[in-house]
Image: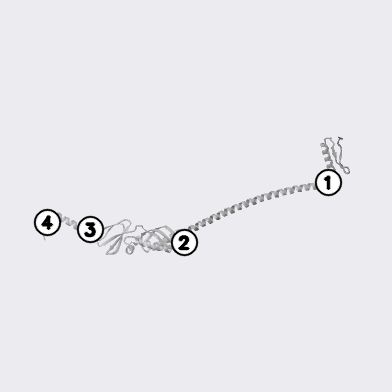
Amino acid sequence: MPLPTWWTQNGWLRWTASGLLGLFVVMVLWPFYPVPTGSRGVVTQFGKIVGIEGEGLAILPPWQKLSNFSIRAEKADIENAEGSTSDTQPVKVSMTVRYSIATDRVAEVFEKYSHDGNLSSYVQTATQEIFKAVTAKYTAPDLIAHRAKVSADINAALRDKLALYGAQVINIDMRNFAFSDSYMHAINEKVTQEQLRLAAENKLKTVEAEQKQKVAVAEAEAAARKAQADGEAYANLTIAKAQAEALRIQNAALAQNKDVLELRRIEVEHVKAEKWNGALPTSIYAGAPIPFMSVGPAR
């Protein structure tokens, strides 16, 4: 069948039509698909997963489709998650959970949970459940005193929980950890009273220490005075013993030789004579019955 005249006479129209037809075919049957960094390409064929492509360029036949699936770190914010302690104190916390999809479980997550790697809703629900379960194991005071351990327990339990969804926990940031206003007021009051008690105990210990110091000083001074008195008494006793011994020796000597006493009297009289200036006394006492006699010149 011969071509129409207009077709043969207008070649440019022929080439244009051919180009458009080729472009249409290429667009429909385009086999090149890019997989960006931090992603995996999930290849499906008539809705069924038939392969996972890594980062880079993937070439697929026209009857297959590629969906990019993120394995980058994602985050889920959980605001005011509520729980209750074992002593029935309500507690709230806000958390940010960072997670990522395990590369060997991309197909499973794509099939069951998410076509793009976003599991925020699952993470939020799981985190709230874990928070309630963990806080129920602690009393309110223990929850405050052992916050690091509570965080570790939540982290461990959440890792196990999210592993069911093919996700792995990177880290958990806990913030705004708080109890009810009435309970916090009671805690603050208790802390204040405890501080006052400790201050009173410290003051009492200081006073007791000062009193003990004063007692020790007084005892030391008393001991020193006693030692001094004992020393003086001992010295006096020693002197008295020496004097008594001297008297005893003198008495013994006098008893053995009466001439010694006469010698002593003569020595005394001799001393008096040496000191006499030659003047007679104006008055003398005599024995009875003459009580007094004046020997001075007559007036």
Question: Around disc 3, counting alpha carbons within 10 Å, would you say few (fewer than 14), some (14 to 19), or many (20 or more)?
Answer: few
Distance CA(mark 1)–CA(mark 4): 185 Å
Q: Amino acid at mark 3?
A: Met
Q: Which residue is mark 2?
A: 140
Pair 2/1: label in front: 2
As displayed, is residue 254 above or below residue 156? above
- Tell me the kind of residue under disc 1: Leu
Among numbered discs 2 and 4, the one appearing first in the sequence: 4
- Label 2, residues with CA under 10 Å away: few <14, some 14-19, many ≥20: many
Quadrant where the image shows the N terminus? bottom left
For discs 2 and 4, the disc positioned in front in the rendered view: 2
Q: Which mark is residue 27?
A: 3
**Outermost residue to the right:** 289
Numbered mark located on residue 6 in the image: 4
The spot of residue 118 in percent (x, y) is: 34, 60
Q: Is residue 295 left or right of residue 164?
A: right
Q: Earlier in the sequence, mark 2 or mark 3?
A: 3
Quarter of the picture holding the C terminus? top right
Q: CA distance from mark 3 to mark 1?
A: 158 Å
